[in-house]
Image (tube, coloured by chain):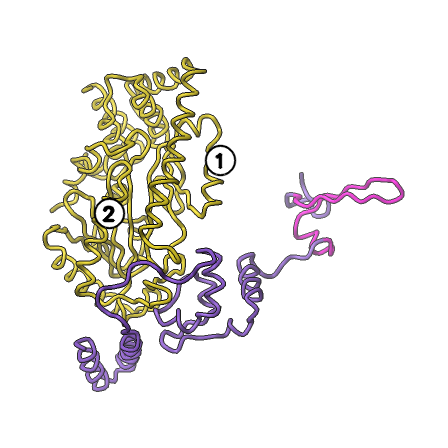
Amino acid sequence: MKLSQLAQRSGAWLKTEGPLAGIVISSRIRLARNLAGYPFLLRCDHQQRLEIQEFLSQQITTLAAPDNLEYINIDEAEDLDRQLLVERHLISHQHAKADGARGMAFSASETVSVMINEEDHLRLQTLQPGLQLDQAWQDANRLDDLFEAKLDYAFSSRFGYLTACPTNVGTGIRVSAMLHLPALKMSGQIEQVTQSARDMRLAVRGLHGEGTQAVGDFYQVSNQRTLGASEQQIIDEFKNTVVPQIVDYEKKTREKLLAEHAAFVDDKVFRALGMLQNARTISSEESLDLLSHLRMGVTLQRLPNVQLETLNDLFLRTQSAHLQQIEGRPLTAEERDIARANYIRQKLSQN
Amino acid sequence: MLCQRCQKNEATIHITEVSNGEHQESHLCEQCAEADGTVVKSPATINQLLNSLIIAHSGAAELAGLTCPECGISFLEFRQQGLLGCPNDYEVFSQALEDLLVRIHGQDIHHVGKVPARGGNRQKKHVELLRLRRDLAKAVESEQYETAAKLRDQIKEFEQR
């Protein structure tokens, strides 16, 4: 398959609305695993890296045959293809930028993806729309079991699954939820939320994970603790306490804003709509900010003619690699801003 | 504001001295203040300072010199780059790591999650494989192809077990 085809469609998982879709964009589970009998990647020489890549890519596509995973050699992929995979959350920014033998594989629905030779030999990720951590865990656990039937993982009874960085050791699990929190941002309460999340040993990051800014009012919340608690305990805490609390806080803030400052909220929403419907050139930052206001307007039922699905699609496909893949050629920054404005106007006029 | 002394660099250090009830202000750049003896530039980066603190705090400066026989990484190297060299490091550095693990994961640092279906206690085999692969890489590097061929056979045999 040519990766440019990916850019022609939204992620399948973005089309269905999961529970609490107004605020929770997606739920994600990631498992970190390493092959026993090999050094971690830092200490692998060129030959060992290659061996691991070849072995894992072959094993994984075979063991998960029913999932029909498509394998991509990242080391040999085009820059634009790598960036496209980052924008779709299928690989990390670090994986795209790194050097040496490495790869990835993903399912057609994009709910399953694996990275080979990122920080660990193997990273398995599952994704679901809305708050559906149980479903994401079920998928991850099923695949992990399939792989484990054939692969020998580095494991100790005391420290669990052994990982290159001790921050992942034990279960190797990273549970995360992508949250859209415009009202908390607008009312200046977001700092309080991120601070108390950090106090609970949670990490709060931007749209593309580690080291990224919280653009478009998107925040990715994930667990830090991976050792000393079971996978189920970590997931339960997330789905029963952490996420519902933040969601509730955002909801109440939205209601309060609407009750006390309806004109202010509508002004934000409809100005955003006006700008997006008329802009002839628009930067990625500006479009993210405006789309964020629009998204809030839709979930507060201020914009009956715009669908959440349309906005999810816009968030995804107005990113720079997507625009270039859609156009079928590399674009300069100026050309991208024009292409972005055109794409948004066209999409919004269809509604 | 320019540095009073050299009149070239931006003044980043501002000092107010009070003597006999009189305030005297001076504005200096970092270099001039250093030459003056007003400030002493730290030779270590913050990271290095933190690392030495952590190592001193774990009560075992000798841990810094601890080295894994399988992958050759020292505890200090690990602290500097944040990543371990091989699974065996968890055994070699276990004492030094405990402190760090508590800080990351909380008081309870015994694994209670999933256990691989296969495996059980295969650690010995895995360490042996690590050793064989390390020797193989060395043999290839020094062009000892006969030794390398033997090691490859041994690795294959080991993997079958």
Residue B75 point in image, percent of width and height: 46, 69
Q: Colour of chain A?
A: yellow
Are discs 2 and 1 less than 8 Å apart at CB? no
Hey, which residue is sitting farthest bottom in the picture? B146
Q: Could you tell whether A222 is left or right of B9 in the image?
A: left
Q: Is A14 located above or below residue B96 in the figure?
A: above
Q: Residue farthest to the right?
A: B20
- As for residue B20 lying within the magenta part, the answer is yes
Q: Which chain is purple?
A: B
**What chain letter is assigned to the residue under label 2?**
A
- Which residue is identified by label 1? A191
- In-image side of B81 versus A19 (left or right): right
Q: Nearer the viewer, residue A14 or B24?
A: A14
Residue in the foreground of this view, choosing between A132 and A182:
A132
Residue at 14%, 51% in the rendered image:
A69
- Pointer 2: what residue? A126
Camera-nearest residue between A229 and A25: A229
The quadrant in which residue B105 appears is bottom left
Q: Residue at x 42, y 74 (%)?
A: B92
